[in-house]
Image: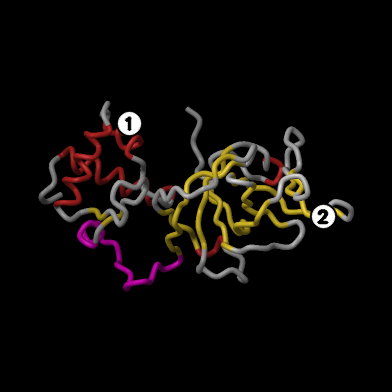
Amino acid sequence: MQNLTPRQLKAFEFIKSHTERVGYAPTLRELCDFMGYKAVGSAQDVIASLRKKGFITTPMKQAARSLTLSDKGKAFYGVKLAAPGDMGDSFLVPCLGKVPAGVPIEAIEDHSGYIRVSSSLLPRSVSQDNLFALQAKGLSMLHAGILDGDWLVIQQQQDAPHGTIVVAQVGDNATVKRLCLDSRRGWYLKPENPDFQEIYADDEPFAVLGRVVALQRTMFDLN
């Protein structure tokens, strides 16, 4: 590739293939592992070189998974460039860190880049506005099909019907659970794993932050 050293080309092609395969860019640590670097600074250096030469952009500098191919990088591979704002059959959703599918931890406010989501994943009633993504952590929603590491696409809203899987804030913490209504005790958050306990609003008040509308998972081969 014109203007790129072999090291830069290797990194560029990894970023491109990773994004095409799973829908978002690799982290610095993943780039280090692929390149054989021991220090994150080495990955930062090669990214800086690619950015300076115009082959990648970083809409959110220093944020994980925010790397994207620039028009110059796309043009080299013959990628048809979309018109501004046109993401074709997919679009970018901002990531706000991790949310436990388990015991609640600190409420999520950690913006960590973007993931690319196919429009076909969303129910027809859901628009692309007011969406954000969280990475599930833990196994309290195992029997609802939510695994540790899954990316959850959330529609921001402050209420949801009975039986809906939601992200809720409990005190200063956030968790993903099924929102349920009990005829005696009222609203509660139900895990989908018998190893975890329900959270009742009359014991621990909680607020709905959003409703889970889609799930995206990365599959790995067994070596």
Local secondary structure at mark 1: helix
Q: CA distance from mark 2 to mark 1?
A: 49 Å
Tell me the amino acid under the disc marked 2.
Gly
Looking at this view, name the residue that lies furthest to the left: 3
Rendered location of residue 165, percent (x, y): 68, 54
Q: Amino acid at mark 1?
A: Asp
Find disc 2 in the rendering and name its residue.
186
Which of 18 and 208 lies nearest the eye of the viewer?
208
Image-quadrant location for residue 123 = bottom right
Instruction: Say which residue appears at 31% left-offset and 37% top-offset.
Output: 31
Residue 219: x, y in percent? Answer: 51, 41
Whether label 2 touches label 1, CB < 8 Å? no
- Queried whether the magenta region covers residue 93, the answer comes back as no
Q: Is residue 18 left or right of residue 97?
A: left
Tag in front: 2 or 1: 2
Residue beneath label 1, please? 33
Q: Most prominent secondary structure in the magenta stretch?
A: loop
